[in-house]
Image: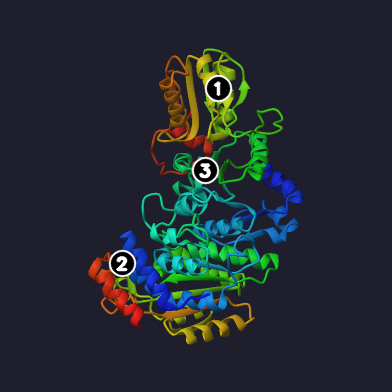
Amino acid sequence: MRNSFIQTLVRRAKVDPKIFLLTGDIGFSLLEPFAEQFPDRFLNVGIAEQNMMGIAAGLSREGYTVFTYSIGNFPTLRCMEQIRYDICYHQSNVKIIAVGAGYAYGSLGVSHHTTEDLGMLRTLPNMVVTSPGDPNEVGALTDFLCTHNGPCYMRLNKVGEPILNGTINSLSLGEVLQVKEGEGTAVLTTGAVLPEAFNFIRSERPDYALYSFPFVSPIDTQAMTKILNRFPRIMTVEEHQMNCGFGSAILEIANDLFYRGQISKMPPVQRVAIPNKFVGFSGSQEYLRREVGLSL
Amino acid sequence: MNFAPRTLRKHILDMSFAGGTVHIPSAFSIVEILSTLYSKHLNYSKDNMHGLERDSLVLSKGHGVMALYACLYQAGILDELDLKNYFKDGSRLKGLSDTHVPGLEVTSGSLGHGLSVGTGMALGHKMAGRPHQVFAVVGDGEMNEGPMWEALLFASHFKLDNLIVIVDKNGFQAMGPTNEVMSLGNLSQKFAAFDFAVEEVDGHDLSELDRALTTLRGQKDGKPKALIANTTKGKGVSFMENDNRWHYTRLDNSTYHGAVKEVEGL
């Protein structure tokens, strides 16, 4: 996913002189292609994330489309107030990119477990929260980020993720992707748990449908209405805490649609997520997912 | 255009009384600083404010915003009605600096943010080869916040000699004197240690402020600049000066008139 991001960004930056990339001293062996081709639009701002967001906001005032890059919770939780105030309130054209979603850097420990970000960021007005499920979604989302005017967040996994979507030419705000048709139960996923859900369905529940959600906020309510009207049972899967994450977002939408009479029944929603805990031991992403019960 | 300190202080008193607001002393301590900037150093006006070819004043200590409103009124950017409706329901003029008000570069109700944003603006000018300056007015209490020092490191490293940080060193913060709450030690030395070019002056002496700003702006050695302005919180009204209760006090009829008398008599 990392590579899909930087390759798309480089392609975009070739034709859009307003794209500016800041990094908080992360990205060795990844960001060099951008830095080398666009030295006047790249800056390592050092290990200072709160300042990085302020700098990004200041640059965006002068017309730049600013991308900020770091790992885990550092470009988000660490500087949430800057994001809320300097970026979201002003609708600054700043895109926050975090690599290492979920337990992608599991063996580094809790400091690098990115497991509360979706919940925290989707509370902020004006923030578009995205969570690609495979490298194709990353490319399309990066394109979207480059043209959408306003604050965005994208949580990347790491590297080596299988491609499960066909070519995605473009994504519109909130778009939902159908990965597999089915009936009875619709599995809704966001982010890099997509392959796990896909494999589970293929081997154990071949009749289930599978949808990937590159956007966690906002989500296209028309698409959701169709899904909820079609499928009597819903399962959500995410590499994020149970509280306030993607599954919560789906519950909110379902409830509001039901309340407004746009769907006739509240479906039972099984939420598969991290059971609101920290994981204090080291492990690979697969190991940690199993250990917390995040498996299908 | 007239940016005389007594005019600015009178506006501050008027809008504070009309709006029933606090933070008067925080506005009073920066009056001479803003007066000097608007009259002599800041290339900013109604005519150039919407483009990029201009200087910027970033008020990072957003609670001093009444002083800025007063200047913007004098500059013809805010009008009579804005000042009369300050703080009222639905007013665009809030108690803390907010970019939804024309003339305000940053929203700075939360301390420690504005300097980073201003530094980003200075960076943008430098990288685009534009000659414009960013003047960031910060508070001494505000210097408690970590990101301020991140911005200082950044400014030095990237040689932002178009950034001038002006510290309103009035010696107070919310809960008491800065020396008692969180001492800044020798602030001039700290800025010098961060590779800034530093001047320290009486923050209420217009000619000293002008001289120091001129000196700093004349230096082209790649260092960002710091002007430590030693000020008095509440300057201009004897019963407010250095009495931190006035940080939180609203004017009533008698104190309003008493204050106006002193300010106009000066």
**Spatial CA span between label 1 and label 2:** 58 Å
In the image, residue A188 lies at what x, y percent? 53, 25
Q: Secondary structure at mark 1?
A: helix
Marker disc for residue B174: 2
Residue B153 in sight: yes
Q: Earlier in the sequence, mark 3 or mark 1?
A: 3
Nearer-the-camera pick, B181 or B7: B7
**Spatial CA span between label 2 and label 3:** 32 Å
Q: Quadrant of the C terminus of chain B?
A: bottom left
Q: Secondary structure at mark 2?
A: loop
1 and 2 marks on the same chain = no
Q: Quadrant of residue A197?
A: top right
* Position of residue B235 in the picture relative to residue B155 (left or right): left
Residue for badge 1: A200
Nearer-the-camera pick, A231 or B169: B169
3 and 1 marks on the same chain = yes
In the image, residue A270 lies at what x, y percent? 44, 23
2 and 3 marks on the same chain = no
Chain letter for the residue marked with disc 3 in the picture = A
Amino acid type assigned to the residue bearing label 2 in the image: Ala
Residue B236 in sight: no
* Position of residue A122 in the picture relative to residue B262 (left or right): right
Residue for badge 3: A127
Q: Residue at x 28, y 70 (%)?
A: B256
Amino acid type assigned to the residue bearing label 1 in the image: Phe
Marker disc for residue B6: none
Chain letter for the residue marked with disc 1 in the picture = A
Badge 2 local density, few (<14 within 10 Å), some, or many (20+)? few
Chain letter for the residue marked with disc 2 in the picture = B
Badge 3 local density, few (<14 within 10 Å), some, or many (20+)? many
**Spatial CA span between label 3 and label 1:** 32 Å
